[in-house]
């Protein structure tokens, strides 16, 4: 029986299969200058969305100009909000490169046309993000999915419009105690609606090959061949491109020392390098989901002090965040 390709998936199938069947081998050299360390961090206002109680959430992210350096800037003169409380829950640890829709700040219903300003000073460079409730900054789920690369610019589908964010429940206390060098167990229950459907380039190519050329053509489609074509093919989107698929990832949000995680976590930042463990990398595929939906991770700390760990569940288009505080002793 010939494979049935849904109309909503046909474009994706054609693009994937075309790269395999036509053997496109063009590679555009990377000419942009990059930096591993020593650069600044650019705070970003991503937009706002209303809450049911009449308040508003202003959404922020950042662009760390470095590919490797992860600066730590405590709340204070180098990392603060104004007006009002300088601590609005912002990160003090900054992951490399572009991190979109990283946290939200709630402002009251009568906020009006005032600005909320986030100031960062990193490696001697001061940068500011100016947040307002202007109508053209209004964000919905389609904007989030488009901005992070789940959708093409200005596109949507019944599937993407039906998608709701995954939900995360941390198993255990939200405030915990740990010791330097001793693994701390973290467990989180993640539930999701299965949308958007996870990216499977091999199956897409096989469906199209069988549709176009029959079983023999489909048999020639191998995971190795598909991955080689993805590796050697130029981007096909004018916007940032992201692989759809559910993952859960812990990262350091605040804290005086380094935090390592076992097993290694999926990168939540836009690491576009081919072999990166990132949904924005060319060869990344969604990891298997635990049958019970429970993700088990061990965290280890290098220095005593108070840490905040950030957990994010992301289905490719939308996300849900949780935080756990850990007081680490020597």
Image (tube, grey):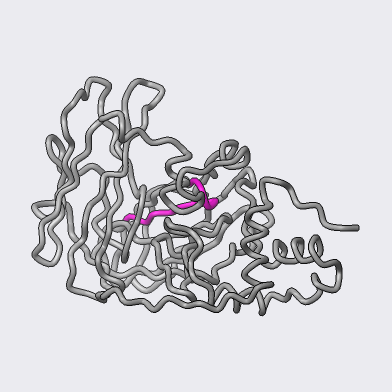
Observer-nearest residue: 277 or 191? 277
Quarter holding the N terminus is bottom right
Question: Of residues 277 and 228, which is closer to you in this image?
Answer: 228
Give the quadrant of residue 303: bottom left
Secondary structure, magenta segment, majority class: strand
Residue at 80% in and 72% down: 217
In the image, what residue occupies the spot 46% across and 54% down? Answer: 149
Residues rendered magenta in the picture: 308-318
Q: In the rendered view, would you say 299 is above or below 77?
A: below
Counting labels gives 0
| Residue at 82%, 67% in the rendered image | 213
Residue lying farthest to the right in this orientation = 1
Question: Which residue is at 64% across, 53% downward?
Answer: 11
Q: Is residue 124 above or below residue 101?
A: below
The percent position of residue 39, horizontal first and vertical second, equals 18, 69
Residue 121 magenta-drawn?
Answer: no
**Quadrant in which the C terminus is drawn:** bottom left
Question: Is 99 situated above or below 157?
Answer: below
x, y percentage for residue 113?
Answer: 18, 26
Give how far across and how far down residue 255 sits, in percent. 27, 61
């Amino acid at each position: 029986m010939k494979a049935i390709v849904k109309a909503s998936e046909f474009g994706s199938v054609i693009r994937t299969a075309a790269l395999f069947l036509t053997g496109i081998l063009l590679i555009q050299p990377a000419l942009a200058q990059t930096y591993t360390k020593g650069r600044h961090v650019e705070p970003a206002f991503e937009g706002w969305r209303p809450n049911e109680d009449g308040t508003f959430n202003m959404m922020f992210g950042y662009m760390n100009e470095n590919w490797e350096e992860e600066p730590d800037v405590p709340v204070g003169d180098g990392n603060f909000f104004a007006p009002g409380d300088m601590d609005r829950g912002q990160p003090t640890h900054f992951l490399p490169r572009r991190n979109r829709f990283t946290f939200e700040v709630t402002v009251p219903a009568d906020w009006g046309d005032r600005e909320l300003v986030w100031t960062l000073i990193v490696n001697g460079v001061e940068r500011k993000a100016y947040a307002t409730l202007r109508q053209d900054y209004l964000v919905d789920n389609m904007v989030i999915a488009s901005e992070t690369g789940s959708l093409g610019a200005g596109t949507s589908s019944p599937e993407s419009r039906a998608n709701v964010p995954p939900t995360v429940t941390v198993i255990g206390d939200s405030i915990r105690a740990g010791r330097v060098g001793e693994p701390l167990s973290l467990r989180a229950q993640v539930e999701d609606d299965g949308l958007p459907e996870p990216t499977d380039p091999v199956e897409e190519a096989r469906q199209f090959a069988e549709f176009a050329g029959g079983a023999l053509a489909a048999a020639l489609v191998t995971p190795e061949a598909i991955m080689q074509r993805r590796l050697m093919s130029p981007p096909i989107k004018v916007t940032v491109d992201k692989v759809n698929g559910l993952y859960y990832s812990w990262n350091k949000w605040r804290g005086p020392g380094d935090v390592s995680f076992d097993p290694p976590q999926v990168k939540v930042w836009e690491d576009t390098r081919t072999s990166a463990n990132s949904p924005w990398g060319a060869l990344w595929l969604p990891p298997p989901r635990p049958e019970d939906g429970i993700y088990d991770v061990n965290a280890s700390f290098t220095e005593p002090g108070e840490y905040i760990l950030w957990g994010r569940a992301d289905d490719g288009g939308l996300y849900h965040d949780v935080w756990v505080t850990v007081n680490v002793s020597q």
